[in-house]
Amino acid sequence: MAVKLRLKRIGAKKKPFYRVIAIDDRSRRNGKEIERVGFYDPHNSSNTKLNLDLVSNWISKGAIPTETVKNLIYNLSK
């Protein structure tokens, strides 16, 4: 089972809000997640949080982050 770190869209129409999750790569975008590692609000970047300990733990186990999640990790780790 390959695991990815990716975004899961929640929120209202035209007001997206995303959870950053660890999920099986064969699952749908909004499928059942393995674990939540943070959230991302594109309208208010100060309201974005990631548990970097969980993220590094999943990456050490072989999880592959998507490009968007890579950018979030990079921007939040500064």
Image (cartoon, helix red, strand yellow):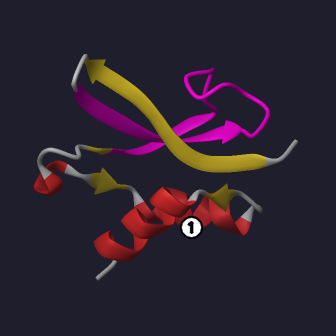
Residue 62: % across, % down: 77, 62
Q: Position of residue 23 (x, y in %)?
A: 66, 37
Which quarter shows the N terminus? top right
The vertical placement of 39 against 33, above or below, is below
Provide the major secondary structure of the magenta segment.
strand
17 to 50, vertically: above or below: above
User: Does the segment drawn in magenta span residue 24?
Assistant: yes
Magenta-drawn segment: 15-39
Position of 35 with respect to 45 (left or right) is: right
Q: Specify the quadrant that holds the C terminus.
A: bottom left
Q: Is residue 22 left or right of residue 69?
A: right
Q: Residues within 10 Å of mark 1 (few under 14, many from 20)?
A: few
- Residue tagged by mark 1? 56
Q: Is residue 44 left or right of residue 52?
A: left
Residue at screen point 67% across, 25% down: 28
Q: Is residue 54 magenta?
A: no
The residue drawn where x is 15% and y is 49% is: 47
Query: Type of residue at label 1?
Result: Ser
Q: Quick one: SS at disc 1?
A: helix
Residue lying at the far top in this picture: please name it. Answer: 13
Residue 16 position by quadrant: top left
Please report the residue visible at 74 percent of the width from the left and 47 percent of the height from the top.
3
